[in-house]
Image: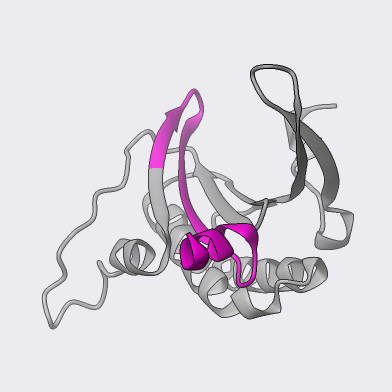
Amino acid sequence: MEDGDRHRSLPAQARENTTTAQGADGQQQGALSVAGATWTLPPWPVSVTWARHLVRAQLLVWGWNQACDVAELLASELVTNAVRHAAGLVLLTLWVVDGVLRCEVGDGSQQLPVRHAAADDDEGWRGLALVEELSSAWGSTSTRWGKVVWFEMPLPGGPAERAAVFG
């Protein structure tokens, strides 16, 4: 299967599975719940709207209704940056691993994002500040075909949120 074929999944066709994690000693550590979905978007402004709808629809399919608003906002910020500052197709990927959502946005630009301090009258430059403020982690990495910018957030009631609350 070509890479392009793999990235045409629709929300209803998302890959979902459960894997058993093993420690270094080979002992079973428990079930690792994994779900993922990937879409390829054209480099058009309307792709930001499509990304918001795809993120919301996929999280609803997975039953993470409470995370929709924040995840939708942060994903749209990353897709907006990819459409504005890079050329070519945009790859949007969602992963849920043991109650943590990871959203990745890939594009063809090698230039890694830099968070700018926006002036009060600036219309832009606030996207990465929002991502930094509302996610538990974010970053970017170079790839052989461009870069991937990502964020993570614990899902409400998921293992990561319970661990943060109950230590």
Q: Furthest residue to the top? A: 25
Reply above or below: 128 against 67.
Answer: above
In this orientation, which residue lies closer to the viewer: 105 or 87?
105
All told, the count of numbered labels is 0
Residue 17 x %, y %: 85, 45
Horizontal arrangement in the rendering, residue 114 relative to residue 1 (left or right): left
Q: Position of residue 46 (x, y in %)?
A: 58, 70
The location of residue 80, given as percent across then percent down, is 45, 63
Q: Is 11 rendered above or below residue 92?
A: below
Question: Residue 9, image x and y in percent?
Answer: 81, 50
Quadrant, the N terminus: top right
At 16% across and 70% down in the image, what residue appears?
118
Q: Residue at x 26, y 72 (%)?
A: 124
Instruction: Farthest residue to the bottom: give it.
Output: 121
Depth check: give the residue in front, 32 or 167.
167
Q: Looking at this rendering, what residue extends furthest in the right direction?
A: 13
Q: Which quarter of the figure has residue 31?
A: top right
Using the image, determine if residue 136 lies above or below residue 126.
Answer: above
Question: Within the magenta stretch, is there residue 110?
Answer: no
| Residue drawn at x 80%, y 35% as measured from the top left | 20
Q: Could you tell whether 119 is left or right of 123 in the image?
A: left
Locate residue 63: give its quadrant: bottom right
> Can residue 71 be seen in the rendering of this structure?
yes
Question: Image point 41% across, 34% down: which residue?
Answer: 141
Asked if residue 156 lies in the magenta stretch, the reply is yes
Task: Please tell me which residue lies in front, 89 or 153.
Answer: 153
Q: Quadrant of residue 123?
A: bottom left
Q: Magenta residues?
A: 140-167
Can the viewer see residue 44 in this picture? no
Which colour assignment does the render follow? one colour
